Image: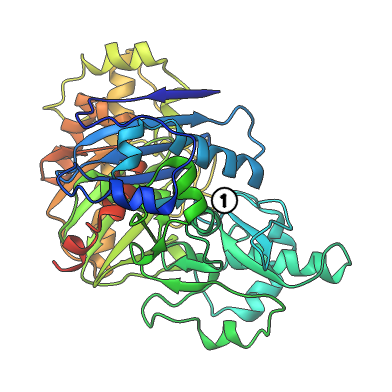
């Protein structure tokens, strides 16, 4: 199903044509007084979205494609990418100056040297590579980010095993989802960004592949890694002609969906953080200091000269869904006395196991005693989650991250005012709503080149 949504656009319309020559397009683009747009494209788990912003970072148009099935193919990605662009207003396409694409972290595929897929995509949560984890542990340093069956490196080695078993063969290029989608636009095969390449083993501190990875002598081409937002090249002429993009339109290196959501939030200085209140509780803190600690599942993405430190707790909205409907959450939250701290001490989990801010794979859910009053029960759950969040940020700072200065909130829980007040009390800081919540918006900022204002803080 495809749904096209456009927001207020004020620009100069041109007549749609079937095809423009390069000379015609250049002539049309001699008029520099036109409004310029920057396009961010987000590929998520259930669909994809494109957002076009203007010079003032205002959204001018957006389109959405929802995936009807959970199974994703490269053909689906390509069709979705081109549909998103095609559904934008003609005048927006004609004035688009730059494009960037994000994808889900750890989603990968293999291509031949012409960019044609030779394997099905392995999605971010595909854990079939558990079969090769002994090999991964023998290669990578202890506690490295790649030591997970869902890492890009583990998936790569799993694909290598299939080749040895005779199920594939030839000269290939290993790419992440955002890498391949970007290739469809700019035509330069084998380029990635250091956000996507982190789980491949790329050393984001030294900006190069480590010796232990280079020594593997893999029978394929690893991507060339550049900074997110780096200019890769101009849009291919065939793509520009098809969608009436200006010949000067550039494609920038992309990022992951979670980093794009952080960029969209408005957090842009050391000490600023974003808490995502979705099914789980995810913390991201912008820091001068890099934090790596596999015991807590902590790793840092590079943002220019800064580091985005991330940690995730298994508590969150999925636990609330076990007990309350949306309507009940809305009604009961309004009755919570947020000025008083609940005496109930829970550790809300769906099943045993936690790694951040407590590292205990056997930690059991603690959801008792349960009062008869549902308001009191919900108060206890939200209060306990607020304590976990505060403990998480405290741990990041104990490990050396920049002190917390402000917290933005994204995700469905951001709308819960009672929860916000409880969290603010525990953190001792005001809780700010994210300026934008769509990852496509953050990617549009990346297309515009706005990562520089974070990198230079």
Residue 125, position in %: x, y? Answer: 59, 48
Question: Is 67 in front, or is 151?
Answer: 67
Q: Above or below — where is 324 with respect to 121?
A: above
Instruction: Give me the residue at 32% from left, 25% from top.
Output: 6
Left or right: 427, with 415 as reference point:
left
Left or right: 344, with 457 as reference point:
right
Element at badge 1? loop
Q: Which residue is mark 1?
A: 124
Instruction: Give me the residue at 21% from left, 64% from top.
Output: 452
Residue 101, position in %: x, y? Answer: 42, 51
Most distant residue in the right direction: 166
Quadrant of the drawing holding the N terminus: top right
Question: Is 410 in front, or is 16?
Answer: 16
Residue 119, position in %: x, y? Answer: 73, 56
**Res. 431 in view:** yes
Residue 265, position in %: x, y? Answer: 24, 44
Q: Above or below — where is 432 with respect to 191?
A: above
């Amino acid at each position: 199903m495809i749904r096209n949504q456009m927001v207020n656009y004020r620009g100069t319309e041109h007549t749609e044509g079937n095809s423009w020559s390069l000379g015609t397009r250049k002539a049309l683009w001699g008029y520099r007084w036109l409004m310029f747009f920057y396009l961010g494209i987000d590929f998520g788990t259930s669909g994809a979205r494109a957002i076009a912003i203007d010079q003032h970072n205002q959204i001018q148009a957006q389109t959405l494609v929802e995936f009807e099935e959970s199974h994703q193919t490269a053909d689906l990605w390509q069709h979705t990418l081109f549909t998103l662009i095609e559904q934008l207003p003609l005048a927006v396409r004609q004035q688009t100056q730059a494009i960037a694409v994000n994808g889900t972290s750890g989603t990968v595929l293999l291509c031949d040297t012409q960019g044609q897929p030779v394997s099905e995509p392995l999605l971010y949560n595909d854990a079939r590579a558990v079969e090769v984890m002994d090999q991964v542990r023998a290669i990578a340093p202890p506690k490295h980010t790649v030591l997970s069956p869902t890492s890009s490196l583990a998936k790569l080695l799993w694909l290598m095993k299939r080749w040895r078993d005779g199920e594939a063969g030839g000269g290939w290029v290993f790419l992440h989802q955002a890498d391949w989608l970007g290739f469809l636009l700019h035509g330069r095969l084998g380029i990635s960004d250091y956000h996507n390449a982190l789980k491949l083993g790329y050393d984001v501190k030294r900006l190069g592949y480590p010796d232990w990875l280079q020594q593997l002598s893999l029978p394929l081409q690893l991507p060339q890694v550049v900074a997110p937002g780096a200019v890769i090249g101009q849009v291919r002429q065939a793509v520009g002609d098809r969608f009436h993009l200006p010949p000067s339109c550039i494609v920038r290196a992309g990022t992951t969906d979670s980093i794009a959501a952080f960029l969209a939030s408005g957090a842009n200085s050391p000490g600023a953080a974003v808490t995502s209140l979705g099914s789980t509780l995810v913390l991201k803190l912008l820091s001068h200091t890099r934090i790596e600690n596999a015991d807590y599942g902590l790793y840092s993405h590079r943002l220019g000269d800064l580091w985005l430190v991330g940690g995730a707790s298994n508590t969150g909205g999925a636990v609330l869904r076990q007990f309350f409907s949306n309507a009940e959450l809305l009604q009961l939250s309004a009755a919570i006395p947020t000025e008083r701290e609940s005496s109930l001490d829970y550790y809300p989990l769906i099943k045993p196991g936690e790694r951040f801010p407590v590292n205990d794979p056997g930690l059991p859910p603690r959801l008792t005693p349960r009062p008869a009053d549902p308001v009191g029960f919900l108060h206890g759950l939200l209060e306990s989650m607020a304590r976990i969040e505060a403990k998480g940020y405290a741990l990041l700072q104990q490990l050396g991250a920049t002190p917390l200065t402000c917290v933005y909130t994204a995700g469905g829980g951001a709308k819960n005012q009672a929860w916000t007040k409880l969290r603010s009390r525990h953190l001792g800081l005001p809780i700010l709503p994210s300026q934008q919540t769509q990852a496509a918006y953050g990617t549009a900022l990346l297309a515009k080149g706005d990562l520089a204002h974070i990198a230079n803080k």
